[in-house]
């Protein structure tokens, strides 16, 4: 079929060969764009045939840490992971010649305009490149304190085979081993299914909008996913806190009230203050995920395909229009 073709998410080389030969004229969808190797080859060998589009995506790539299962039910362990992750190394890892396939992005997506900017995040412990060696040393000290000197528990690391999950997983597994001496039993799977919805995972790689959908011009709907009663999210997404196991009902009610006020207040300054408090809380106290950066998807088409124009942001980006109201019976 000349034009669009459907490929298995594992069949990247077939997709690439079809693009080169002209069997298909456009390749790339969602988080299953071209691999790094294909991007490099397109730049160096096929730039006259293939046009690359490095498309900003509404996903942030993370290591999800289950706060309800050992060893990540201990906040200190989640803290150590967030301290040691070298986000600048990830950015370099995902740079192919002049193509950046990741961007600095932590918790709320930078496209929204109401997030804490990357420049400020880069001054925080774990995010500051100038103190990375000290952060790695502190992470190892914490883990030695929790598990015993040099001891690291074996645990399952679940990897779904979509490109946007597999590549950060490979990088992360290598980083854990190299910098923390921590190895995992890697489980390659086709779908998270009950692993995620029933909180059966220990650690897994994810590429998602994290907090429901954080690309929205109005923040209320975007963070409902963090409310303990208004959400369809699994328990392991809600019940992380600065301690061990589940937080107290008082802790949950406190942050539910913050979210409810964000969703209802008409005072923009008050909303901005509360959003900042919530983002700092997620990044410093709940720690249900170690974020590594925003995702760019590498899509491509043959240059003989005319009229192709990719939107600035790919995939179901939501822009609410609060000045308009539609009513239906």
Image: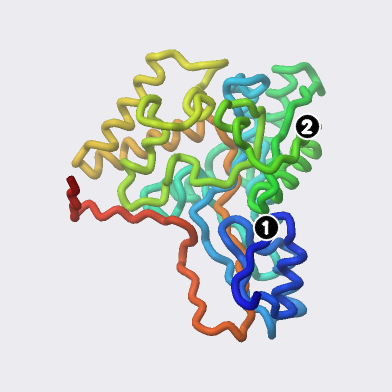
In this view, the mark in front (2 or 1): 2
**Considering the image in quadrants, where does the N terminus appear?**
bottom right
What residue is at 70 percent from the left and 65 percent from the top?
96
For residue 94, which numbered disc appears in the image?
1
- Quadrant of res 186: top right
Q: Which residue is mark 2?
A: 184
Please tell me whether residue 275 is drawn above or below residue 307 in the rendered image.
Answer: above
Q: CA distance from mark 2 to mark 1?
A: 23 Å
- Quadrant of res 8: bottom right
Q: Position of residue 179 (x, y in %)?
A: 77, 37
Q: Position of residue 255 (x, y in %)?
A: 37, 26
Mark 2 residue crowding within 10 angstroms, few (<14) / some (14–19) / many (20+): some
Are dots 2 and 1 in contact, CB under 8 Å? Answer: no
Q: Secondary structure at mark 2?
A: loop
Q: Position of residue 239 (x, y in %)?
A: 49, 23
Residue 119 lies left or right of residue 253; in this view the side is right
- Front-lying residue, 205 or 148: 205
Mark 1 residue crowding within 10 angstroms, few (<14) / some (14–19) / many (20+): many
């Amino acid at each position: 079929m000349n034009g669009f073709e459907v490929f298995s998410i594992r069949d990247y080389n077939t997709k690439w060969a079809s693009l080169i030969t002209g069997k298909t004229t456009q390749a790339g969808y969602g988080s299953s764009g071209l691999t790094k190797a294909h991007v490099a080859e397109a730049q160096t060998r096929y730039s006259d045939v293939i046009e690359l589009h490095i498309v900003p995506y509404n996903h942030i790539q993370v290591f999800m840490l289950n706060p309800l299962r050992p060893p990540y039910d201990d906040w200190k362990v989640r803290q150590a992971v967030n301290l040691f992750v070298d986000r600048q190394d990830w950015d370099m890892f995902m740079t192919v010649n002049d193509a950046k396939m990741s961007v600095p992005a932590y918790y709320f997506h930078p496209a929204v305009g109401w997030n804490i900017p990357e420049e400020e995040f880069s001054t925080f412990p774990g995010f500051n490149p100038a103190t990375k060696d000290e952060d790695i040393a502190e992470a190892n000290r914490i883990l030695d304190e929790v598990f015993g000197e040099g001891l690291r528990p074996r645990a399952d690391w679940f990897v779904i085979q979509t490109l946007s999950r597999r590549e950060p997983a490979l990088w992360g597994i290598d980083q854990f081993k190299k910098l923390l001496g921590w190895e995992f039993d890697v489980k390659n799977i086709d779908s998270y299914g009950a692993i995620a919805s029933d909180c059966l995972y220990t650690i897994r790689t994810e590429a998602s909008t994290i907090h429901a959908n954080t690309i929205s011009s109005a923040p209320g709907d975007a963070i409902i996913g963090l409310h303990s009663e208004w959400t369809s999210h699994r328990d392991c997404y809600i019940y992380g806190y600065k301690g061990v196991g589940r937080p107290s009902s008082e802790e949950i009610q406190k942050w539910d009230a913050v979210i409810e006020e964000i969703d209802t207040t008409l005072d923009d300054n008050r909303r901005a203050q509360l959003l900042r408090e919530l983002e700092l809380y997620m990044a410093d106290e709940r720690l249900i995920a170690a974020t590594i950066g925003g995702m760019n998807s590498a899509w491509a088409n043959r240059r003989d395909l005319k009229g192709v124009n990719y939107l600035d942001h790919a995939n179901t980006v939501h822009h609410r229009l609060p000045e308009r109201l539609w009513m239906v019976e």
